[in-house]
Amino acid sequence: MEEFVDKALDYASKRAKFAEVRLFTSSKNTVLMKNGTISASGYSVDSGLAIRLLNSSIAFSSINIPDWDRIREEIDRGIRMSERPGRNRFSEEKPEKDSWNVGEKMKIEDVSFEDRVSRMKLLDGILNEGKISMRILSLGDTIEEEYNINSEGMELRSRLPKVSFFAMIGFMENGSFEQGTLEVGYSGGYESFERWKLEERLEHESEVLRKAANAKKLVEGKYDLVAGPEISGIVAHESAGHPTESDRILGREMAQAGESFIKKGDKGRRIGSDIVSLVDDPTMNNSFGFYKYDRDGVKARKRYLYKDGLINDFLSSRESAGRMGSASNGASRSSEWDKEPLVRMSTTYIEPRDYDFGELIEDVKEGIYMRSFTEWNIDDIRFNEKYVGREAYHILNGEIKEAVRRPVIETTTINFYSSIDAIGSDLEFSAGTCGKGDPMQGVDVWMGGPHIRLRNLNVR
């Protein structure tokens, strides 16, 4: 399809105030194993042109047929859509010219199918030895290649390899069932396995489920909470990342993924204690949400969504920033060639401070240490939220005691962040696929943070 990119831009530019043509190609390997047996595997290549046009409104169209007459017809269709009244402004940005890629120490192309299977069999064997009765493992890798140009002079090329692993495991004993997940992702090659230490982590998760299945519920009441990075991550993603998406604030996602409790004029509004800062940073090396430029061609940068307890910035694309009368901060992403770019997160986390883990625990007279979650829920304005612990322990007089089963925290976004009185110096991430839009599109993200301490929460 590359031979048509320049030709398509030249044709579209003569008929639109603004034109953009993006060639996106994705090659994927996937292996799925259930209880030690390969149940599915596949290799696919998907490629096509995404075209955006601006006249009276912004129009998006796409095609993957390498035939100029069909491509021209698709551009003409987009032109007709762009002449209808509607949103008609992009923020003004510097047109970038660059070529970038993420390096690999162990290239995806050099890892055979047999090697992928042997890695999964090793991990499944560890879980089987731990008497984990439900074992669903998925290993995937992707190479995304993009050529993106527009009528303002932007010209970007990129190559982004990524590897991911997902495990869903379940354990039953004496009629009590517990399940958990482990999801990791990495921008780069199969050197990721050295960093992940999956054997150790799955051994740990097996022991966690055994303890949880035999643990007792805690008496309902007010407790201090020490939450681990997995909790920090899901909270950051759901109650900072999503509500600061500017298209959600402007109401575009209203009938799909919901709205936001944050309003357009809320920058500077207090959201939590003054030690709390929330970051979204697509430039973090090897993060699963990494990119150097977003789909609009805006250079990526670190963004403080909440800073020192105050709402600080909104995630934006050129379209949403244009509607708000501001500059884009590079948060435009899409999952495939036939999906329009939307405002999306990348790597979202609570910024670490200076406490070590022992200091967080030692000042708790009675509380809960919730290291990971088995369930979470949040409403469609990202305000009322609930977290159910998977690995959790009773804290008494500064010491971690017995495991407790599924402690439940129900609170609000403002109450959660306002209750934080100490933040750890560690920083860990887990991976995920964030869904949004209609048609739905999932993009790769990282979410995480340090251990954090909250005071006087309702726990049941």
Image (cartoon, grey):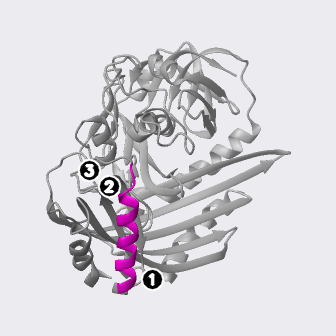
> In what element is the residue under mark 3?
loop
Nearest to the eye among marks 1 and 3: give it: 3
Mark 3 and mark 2 lie on one chain; the one further toward the N terminus is: 3
Q: Position of residue 305 (x, y in %)?
A: 34, 32
**What residue sits right under mark 1 in the picture?**
112
Check the picture and name the quadrant holding the N terminus. bottom left
> In what element is the residue under mark 1?
loop
**Separation of marks 1 and 3 at Cα, in angstroms:** 30 Å
The structure residue drawn at horizontal position 36% and vertical position 24%, both measured from the top left corner, is 276
Of the residues shown, which amino acid type is indicated by label 1? Ser
Quadrant of the image occupied by residue 8: bottom left
- Of the pair 317 and 352, the residue shown nearer to us: 317
**Separation of marks 1 and 2 at Cα, in angstroms:** 25 Å
Mark 1 and mark 3 lie on one chain; the one further toward the N terminus is: 1
Residue 157 visible in the picture: no
Using the image, determine if residue 413 lies above or below residue 256.
above
- Of the pair 169 and 362, the residue shown nearer to us: 169
Using the image, determine if residue 173 lies above or below residue 402.
below
**What residue sits right under mark 2 in the picture?**
290
Using the image, determine if residue 376 lies above or below residue 205.
above
Of the residues shown, which amino acid type is indicated by label 2? Phe
Q: Position of residue 33 (x, y in %)?
A: 63, 70
Q: Are marks 3 and 2 in contact (CB under 8 Å)?
A: yes
Q: Position of residue 259 (x, y in %)?
A: 51, 35
**What residue sits right under mark 3 in the picture?**
283
Residue 80 visible in the picture: yes
What is the span of residues highlighted in magenta in the rendered image? 69-85
Of the residues shown, which amino acid type is indicated by label 3? Thr
**Separation of marks 3 and 2 at Cα, in angstroms:** 6 Å
